[in-house]
Image (cartoon, helix red, strand yellow):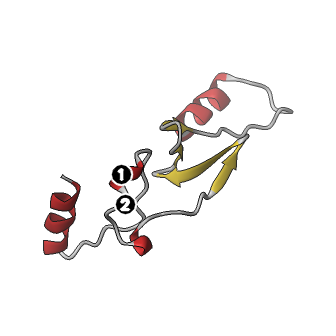
Amino acid sequence: MQQDLIDMLCKGEFSLRKWSSHHPALLKHLAPEDVERNLLVNFGNESVIKALGLFWNTTTDKLMFCVQFNPDTAFIKRSVLRIIASI
């Protein structure tokens, strides 16, 4: 399926790159320049990759997000909704 996807997108001149997976067998058939090896972010104790606005731990296959808030501001309905909308 992976190769079929690559072939189909190549016909439309879309080159897939920066592949990453929690399953190493999916990456071994790819060219080394197409595999994302750089872990971009340290999230607590875990190294993760930022993908589609989320943080992805490829080892545990977990998606995470980070919310920043100012502890000096009061939690009112508007601020809580703003944080939820950012996720």
Location of residue 13 in the rendering, given as x and y in whole percent from the top left corner: 20, 76
The extreme right residue here reads 72
Asked whether the residues under the numbered discs 1 and 2 touch, taking CB atoms below 8 Å apart as contact, a structural biologist would say: yes
Amino acid type of the residue that numbered disc 2 sits on in the rendered structure: Lys
- Looking at the image, is 70 positioned above or below residue 20? above
Please name the residue shown 14% across and 65% down the image.
8
For disc 1, the marked residue is 25
- Looking at the image, is 31 positioned above or below residue 86? below
Location of residue 82 in the rendering, given as x and y in whole percent from the top left corner: 60, 35
For disc 2, the marked residue is 28
Left or right of 70? Residue 49 is left
Task: Please identify the quarter of the rendering in which residue 67 is found.
Answer: top right
Please name the residue shown 61% across and 34% down the image.
83
Task: Please identify the quarter of the rendering in which residue 84 is found.
Answer: top right
SS type, badge 1:
helix
Amino acid type of the residue that numbered disc 1 sits on in the rendered structure: Ala
SS type, badge 2:
loop
Left or right of 66? Residue 6 is left
Location of residue 11 in the rendering, given as x and y in whole percent from the top left corner: 13, 73
- Looking at the image, is 37 positioned above or below residue 75? below
Left or right of 73? Residue 14 is left
Q: Tag 1: Cα neighbours inside 10 Å, few (<14), some, or many (≥20)?
A: few
Please name the residue shown 31% across and 67% down the image.
16
Task: Please identify the quarter of the rendering in which residue 10 is found.
Answer: bottom left
